[in-house]
Amino acid sequence: MVECLKEMLSLGAQPPIYIILDALDECPITSTIPPSPREEVLEFVDEIVALRLSNLHICVTSRPEHDIRVVFEHLTKHSVSLHDEIGQQEDITNYVTSFVRSNQRMKRWRDDDKNLVIKILSEKADAMYVR
């Protein structure tokens, strides 16, 4: 399938093509048979970037895990990291607070317990935000 996609991408006179890979860090890094699924995806991205197609735009989202950073350091022209941004942490805290305060089961909890849950989840989220 990868070869077929590469061939289709290489066809002449194409409009802009956008490939979006979301949450690459959630792709498994272990496998009983090498390469792992994440290594396969990283190889795929490397191969399509190597095609140097001017109409191809690739956007990858991921937490900055070491193996991913190593591959993308030499592939990217533009890198944007939100991992340590204050706004990212605020979004997580706001979401957790909203959930804890509006959840029917948690409404019966003591305020101290609710505040502890909000504090711990916000601090330990590691910039991971899932709705």
Image (cartoon, helix red, strand yellow):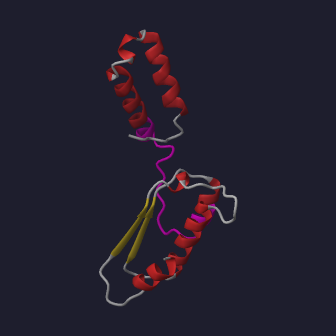
Q: Position of residue 76 (x, y in %)?
A: 51, 68
Instruction: Tell me if residue 73 is in the magenta stretch.
Output: yes
Picture quadrant where residue 107 is located: top left
**Which residue sits at x=66%, y=66%?**
35
Residue placed farthest to the top in the image? 110
Q: Position of residue 31 (x, y in %)?
A: 66, 58
**Which residue sits at x=50%, y=54%?**
62
Q: Nearer the viewer, residue 73 or 19?
A: 19
| The C terminus lies in quadrant | top left
Residue placed farthest to the front in the image? 32
Count of numbered marks: 0
Q: Which residues are magenta?
A: 70-89
Q: Position of residue 38 (x, y in %)?
A: 59, 61
Q: Nearer the viewer, residue 53 or 5?
A: 5
Question: Viewed as shown, does residue 122 lie left or right of 73?
Answer: left
Instruction: Tell me if residue 12 is in the magenta stretch.
Output: no
**Which residue sits at x=47%, y=65%?**
78
Residue placed farthest to the bottom in the image? 12
Is the residue 119 above or below the residue 131 in the image?
above
Q: What type of secondary structure mainly makes up the magenta span?
A: loop
Is the residue 67 above or below the residue 5 in the image?
above
Picture quadrant where residue 32 is located: bottom right
Q: Nearer the viewer, residue 76 or 26?
A: 26
Residue 52 appears anywhere in the view: no
**Which residue sits at x=38%, y=88%?**
11
Q: Position of residue 43 (x, y in %)?
A: 59, 71
Residue 26 appears anywhere in the view: yes
